[in-house]
Structure formats: C-alpha cells, structure tokens
Amino acid sequence: MECIPQQFEENKRAMRAIQDSMDVLNGKWKIIIISSICCYSKRRFSDMLTDIPGISNKMLSKELKELEINQLVIRTVLDTQPITVQYELTEHGKTLKTIIDTLTEWGLAHHRNIFGK
Amino acid sequence: MECIPQQFEENKRAMRAIQDSMDVLNGKWKIIIISSICCYSKRRFSDMLTDIPGISNKMLSKELKELEINQLVIRTVLDTQPITVQYELTEHGKTLKTIIDTLTEWGLAHHRNIFGK
DNA sequence: CTGAATCCAGATGGATACTG
DNA sequence: CAGTATCCATCTGGATTCAG
C-alpha cells in the first residue's frame, strides 16, 4: 500500500476515529459489561456481577458510571423491595452491537486458531 | 432469569469469546498500533512513534512485543545502516481488520453524535 | 535507529467492611 | 440489593539515560 498524500490524510482521520472509540470503551471491563447488557437487553447489577467472572462490585459500579456519563447506558432504579437497579443501552449504545458482534466472532476464530479446530 | 437455557448458554459462549478478544487486545495502545500497521501494511518503529500521538518508545516496544507473542504481528530487522525494524501483520493479525474497520466507523459516528452533525 | 534499563509518581483494582 | 468507603499492593506508563 503506497501512500499518496490523500491516502495519508485518510489514514490519520481513521486513526483519530479509533482513538475516539477507544476513549469511550477503554477500561478493563467496559466491553464485556456492554455485551452483558446487550445479551439480555436489560440487566440488573447483581446479575452482571455473576455474568462477569472476576469483576468486583467496585469496578462494575465505576465502569457503569462512566458508561452512563458517556450516554451509552441508562440506569433505572426500580421501586422494589429491596430496590433493584436496571441497566440498558441507550439508542446510541445500541449501535455498539456491531462492535460486540465483530469482537465475538473474532474471539471465536481466534480461539480456533490458537487451540486448533 | 427469563432466559431459556439454550439462549443462556449461547450468551455465555459469546461473552467468553469477547473475553478472548479482549485478553489479546487489551492495553492502552494495542488497537491503535494495529491500525497504524494495518493502514500502511508495513510500518517502522520510528514511523509508528510519530503516527501515534502521545505514545512513548517504551510502551510502543512493550505492546509490540506482546502482539508479537500473540502472533498478530511479525517483527523484521532490516539490514540497513543504522538498522531499522519493520512490523507487519500476520495472516491471523490481518483478520483484525474487520474489528479495526468497525471501530473506525463507530468512532466517526460517535463523533458526529457527540459534536453534532 | 531501535530499543532496553532505571526511576518513580500516580492510576488501577482487589478485599473487606459498611450503609440505606 | 446496590452501591460507597477505605486500605493497600500491584501495575502503568512517562521521562530520561544508555547501548548495540
């Protein structure tokens, strides 16, 4: 791929776009949290705690808060006894599904690639 | 849990696949490094250092090494004076392009979404 | 040029205990 | 149940220097 200047500008733009994505998605658990909500469309705090092996309540809480700030998830307190909290993706958050799907497929292929078929 | 067991198993499998992907791609700079190589198909150490704003040689070196261990990039020492080192994607690494593309597109859309059309 | 080595502040994240 | 608070070890990553 030889680089004509036009292509060069395009590359830089693409890389900035990736940075934008990563700024929002960086964090040890962000992607997997989103995929958990995505799978079930609505998911409670405690359920995610068991969905995701190894995560602590502190990290789950923290990363959910960041995702909420970035307008990717909505937090809803349900008036149950005791209270439960439900998380779901915003419309904008739902557009992440293509990323989730791509990562899922690649993960499966990667697994086959490493551990044989 | 409202999930039928079959769906439930499928979700868990998908989430494990994502974890597999993230295990390999985690790291502050991995994705952007790969996208840099991907853009140019072959890229030298010093070029990447300028491609990627903010990265230090230490981090670039470290993450490249991890990518090499995971068989996603190939490192080639060129017999120039002084020596230069070229990095390119393995066949397996090239399959990451779908992820890169998806992240690029989402980043662009996200940018429009946040900063207006 | 391409790193490795060292130093070191600050971020990350687990464990545990606690609250409403 | 859904967090918050605290302690604390480990990791991260920048700056700088050095080496082949």
Image (tube, coloured by chain):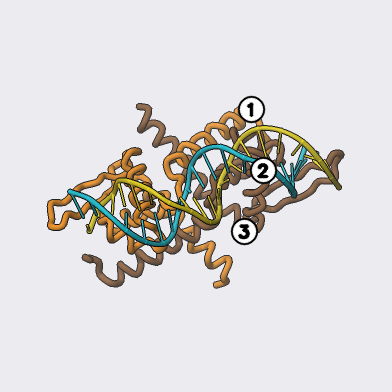
Chain colours: A orange, B brown, C cyan, D yellow
Instruction: Tell me the amino acid under the disc marked 2.
Output: Lys
Q: Nearer the viewer, residue A71 or B7?
A: A71
Image location of residue B21, percent across then percent down:
50, 57
Identify residue for label 3.
B70
Q: Between marks 1 and 3, how big is the CA–CA gap?
A: 33 Å
Write down the chain letter for disc 2.
B
Q: Within the image, what quadrant is residue C9 found in?
A: top right
Same chain for mark 1 and mark 3? The answer is no
Write down the chain letter for disc 1.
A
The label nearer to you, 1 versus 3, is 3
Q: Between marks 2 and 3, how big is the CA–CA gap?
A: 19 Å
Q: Within the image, what quadrant is residue A90 found in?
A: top left
Classify mark 3: residues with Cα within 10 Å, few (<14), some (14-19) or many (20+): some
Which one is earlier in the sequence, the residue at label 2 or at label 3?
Answer: 2
Classify mark 2: residues with Cα within 10 Å, few (<14), some (14-19) or many (20+): few
Q: Is residue B115 above or below residue A100?
A: above
Q: Nearer the viewer, residue A44 or A113?
A: A44
Instruction: Tell me the amino acid under the disc marked 3.
Output: Asn
Of the 4 image quadrants, the one containing the N terminus of chain A is top right
Image location of residue B97, percent across then percent down:
55, 49
Q: Which residue does the image show at 37% across and 27% down from the upper left?
A: B115
Instruction: Tell me the amino acid under the disc marked 1.
Output: Pro
Identify residue for label 1.
A5
Q: Is residue B3 above or below residue A77?
A: below
Number of labelled discs? 3
Q: Which residue does the image show at 71% across and 41% down from the upper left?
A: B45
Secondary structure at badge 1 equals: helix
Secondary structure at badge 3 equals: loop
- Label 1 close to label 3 by CB (< 8 Å): no
Q: Which mark is residue B58?
A: 2
